[in-house]
Image (tube, helix red, strand yellow):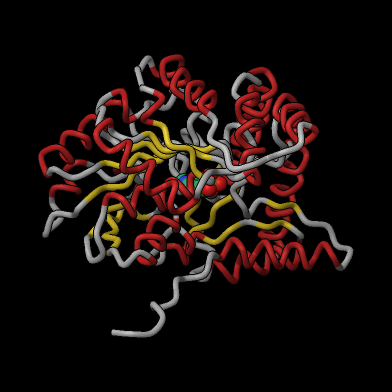
Amino acid sequence: MTGPKPPLEPFHAVEINRLAHARARSGLDVIHMEVGEPSAGAPAPALAAAARSLRGGRLGYWYSDALKERIASHYAGWYGVSVAPERIVLTPGASGALLLAFTVLFRAGERVALGRPGYPAYRNVLKALGMEPVEIPCGPLTRYQPTAAMLEALTPAPAGLVVASPANPTGTMLSRDDLGALAAACRRLSIPLISDEIYHGITYGERAASVLEVERDAIVINSFSKYWCMTGWRLGWLVSPPGLAEEMMSYAGNIFLTPSTLAQHAALAAMDAHEELAAHLDTYAANRRLVMDSLASIGITRVAPADGAFYVYADIGHLTDDSLGFCKRLLADTGVAFNTGLDFDPVEGHRTLRISFAVSAAETAEAMARFGRWLSSR
Ligand SMILES: Cc1ncc(COP(=O)(O)O)c(C=O)c1O
């Protein structure tokens, strides 16, 4: 077959974001809770380090060994896990790490399992690479996460599994035991387990367990975008199993050369900005409570247990079966931007929405008040 590949589904969050910006340009106010990004910027030491390296002049292609070592020590500090710096591959965001992992691990035509709802790029990047995403429908009974039994029930067996904990859009987590069971199932099937840990550090009870605590040969995806508030800096990393590290590095070098040099300087400093980052967590925790309470008070009670990340994923099937239209009307009428669940679940997402609460406490309170008034006036 020749010609371009079939088109990918659009990212609806981008469309709602575009409408929200158009509204702001026309002089109307907007509360942005449609995109998954912290409204706070990079921590102050990161900005200072970036300014120093800009003044230093030449920002050539560069790979920071110091940052790889610092990330390796982060695994010892946060999880008590020993990771050799050689296993860390720096990438342009978690997006780059996902592209790298899928490219190295799977061949065109292979089937790769993932939970639905889930982050849309898993499905779409797999498709872009000619692989076949196999979605495992997950609901409240399993906290919207796939289980070992669900994985092992797939026929034919997939060539790999992708999980995320805390997940996007639900915020739900896999415990250390859940990860252990999934890792054991992947071992039985002789397939790689890819664990997206981009929301680690942002949790509201239990800390998030890393897959590396239970499986040395799993692949970890992570990034400076979320906990470290550095979305636009485009820097992330992948932890490779020891036997694949060289191959990962040579693919990464060919696909990306190096990640952003400026971002690597900044990220090294960001990794020690604990106090500043902890303050954001207090805001997220208060916002999460406010969103959950406000939803409950307006009768939206089928809500995923948001263990971590900065999202609330809610079933609004009693209000609409067109969540995209619902979000667009809400934006047009009130200036509050939420995202449709369709991005995360092409099958059931017409009845769900995702609220991203990584904004200020005042914005969260105002958005939920407007949402409540809008619903009662419909
Ligand atoms: C679960 C998940 N993985 C990966 C990414 C990509 O993040 P980035 O490329 O900014 O590091 C995102 C972004 O929202 C995400 O939610």
Residue 163 in the image: above or below residue 324? above
Q: Nearer the viewer, residue 170 or 104?
A: 104
Q: Position of residue 205 (x, y in %)?
A: 48, 23
Residue 20 visible within the image: yes
Q: Quadrant of the N terminus?
A: bottom left
Q: Quadrant of residue 206 in the image?
A: top left
Q: Quadrant of residue 228 in the image?
A: top right
- Check the image and name the residue furthest to the right: 27
Please give the name of the residue rendered at 73% of the width and 63% of the height, measured from the top-left corner.
Answer: 20
In the shown orientation, is residue 22 left or right of residue 264?
A: right
Q: Position of residue 337 (x, y in %)?
A: 68, 57
Please give the name of the residue rendered at 32% of the width and 30% of the height, measured from the top-left corner.
Answer: 211
Q: Quadrant of residue 329 in the image?
A: bottom right
- Check the image and name the residue furthest to the bottom: 2
Residue 281 in the image: above or below residue 354? above
Tally of marks: 0
Q: Nearer the viewer, residue 308 or 124?
A: 124
In the shown orientation, is residue 57 left or right of residue 99?
A: right
In the shown orientation, is residue 84 left or right of residue 243?
A: right
Q: Position of residue 225 (x, y in %)?
A: 58, 40
Q: Position of residue 230 (x, y in %)?
A: 64, 39
Q: Quadrant of the C terminus?
A: bottom right
Residue 294 visible within the image: no
Q: Nearer the viewer, residue 80 or 340?
A: 80
Please give the name of the residue rendered at 63% of the width and 56% of the height, measured from the top-left corner.
Answer: 338
Q: Nearer the viewer, residue 44 or 209?
A: 44
Please give the name of the residue rendered at 30% of the width and 61% of the height, measured from the top-left corner.
Answer: 133
Residue 176 in the image: above or below residue 343? above
